[in-house]
Amino acid sequence: MDALKRLGPVSIRALAKHLKRNDNNVHRDVTALLDLRLLARDDAGLIPVPWDAVEIRLALDGVNAAA
């Protein structure tokens, strides 16, 4: 996500090339982030990161971590 933020809206292929990673592996990673709704495609089909930070909260042992 950091690389996506720095690059701006980009295709998965361009992201993979920038990261020097296999296209299929980057596609799998981006698809997982899309499924989690941490990323979304824009109207051109590119992947932007429109925010500066992502906050993740996890409940541990049934205790609300946000409390």
Image (cartoon, helix red, strand yellow):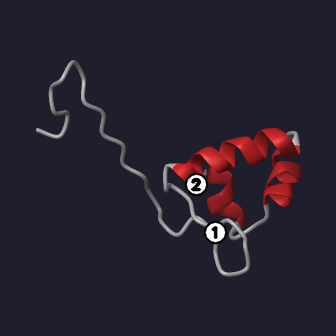
At a point 89% along the width and 51% down the height, the residue shown is: 17
Q: Give the SS element for disc 2.
A: helix
Q: Who is closer to the viewer here, 18 or 34?
A: 34
The kind of secondary structure element at disc 1 is loop
Name the kind of residue labelled 1 in the image: Arg
**Amino acid type at mark 2:** Leu
**Is 50 positioned to the left or the right of 23 in the image?**
left
Q: Nearer the viewer, residue 12 or 17?
A: 12
From the top left corner, tell me how far across and down residue 43 is, in percent: 66, 81
* Mark-to-mark CA distance, 2 and 1: 8 Å
The answer to whether marks 2 and 1 mark residues whose Cβ atoms lie closer than 8 Å is: yes
Q: Residue at x 56, y 59 (%)?
A: 39
Pinpoint residue 31: horizontal percent, then vertical percent: 66, 49
Which residue lies most toward the bottom here?
43
Residue ID for mark 2: 34
The answer to whether residue 57 is left or right of residue 38 is left
Residue pointed to by mark 1: 41
Q: Is residue 19 visible?
A: yes
Left or right for 39, reference 13 = left
